Image (cartoon, rainbow, N blue to C red):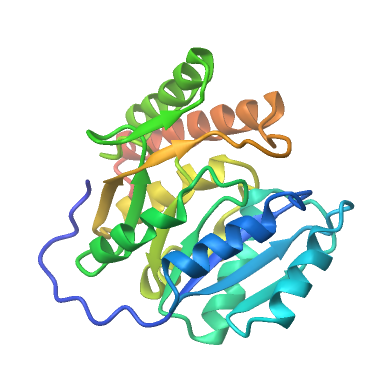
Amino acid sequence: MSDGGQRTYGPLGTTLVIIPTYNEAENIGLIVGRVRAAVPEAHVLVADDNSPDGTGKLADELASGDDQVHVLHRKGKEGLGAAYLAGFAWGLEKGYGVLVEMDADGSHQPEELPRLLTALTGADLVLGSRWVPGGRVVNWPKSREFLSRGGSTYSRLMLNVPIRDVTGGYRAFRRETLEGLGLDEVASAGYCFQVDLARRAVRKGFRVVEVPITFVERELGDSKMSKDIVVEALWRVTQWGLRERAAKLAGKRPA
């Protein structure tokens, strides 16, 4: 947890759940339905990267029957971070008060979203955490858990951020938080995008709270994780950490 000090928080406003998709035809109807059931007042934005399996068309069909479901069609596969940035821009322009990151494959349980939103009444950013007491993962091999824990630990220590699950992707932001993170300066497109936003929130003095979640490995479709994504994340985290250390030694404020 990172505490930006005592402050008074205003009402949350309307929630927008952003779900990036690429070839998630098997999952999109299920996850949107679960979100709508778990938090009926929330809106959903499917940010589809021109999926060749027809995910975008299925999302359009869902939206045609529900005015709280929206679709953002993107030109192609440009990475998780790029999809979220586009979704954030769309949601901020439309005036949503809370913007949520959620995977399309069901690994982030929509039924846990009310707890994240409750925590957000006293925070700037809430992270659904696998690695705090009460958090857990289901159906992961030990090697995958070791890699994820190790990545979070390395990032936390390298960047000096007091967050246990800095790589996790189940998050709820107040709009004011996103507006203060300098999103136009975010260059990371892959999964290190999550680390980038977390470190920015801490550096800006925002109050960041972790809430335990149960992460469930996908049952349908293929994982988007790859060796290249892991390498990019490690390289960027190392680069950020070394740059900040050099700036500190030089007596400068990190960028």
Q: Residue furthest top?
A: 143
Q: Residue furthest left?
A: 6
Instruction: Pick whichever, 207 or 181, lies toward us.
Output: 207
Q: Residue at x 20, y 76 (%)?
A: 9
Q: Is residue 41 left or right of residue 132?
A: right
> Would you say residue 167 is visible in this rendering?
no
Relative to 40, residue 55 above or below: above
> Would you say residue 47 is visible in this rendering?
yes
Q: Is residue 155 left or right of residue 68?
A: left
Instruction: Pick whichever, 171 or 92, lies toward us.
Output: 171
Q: Residue at x 37, y 54 (%)?
A: 112
Residue 47: image x %, image y %?
69, 64
Relative to 139, residue 181 above or below: below
Instruction: Pick whichever, 224 or 65, lies toward us.
Output: 65
Q: Quadrant of residue 212?
A: top left
Relative to 92, residue 156 above or below: above
Residue 187: image x %, image y %?
62, 51
Q: Residue at x 52, y 55 (%)?
A: 102
Q: Is residue 138 left or right of residue 90?
A: left
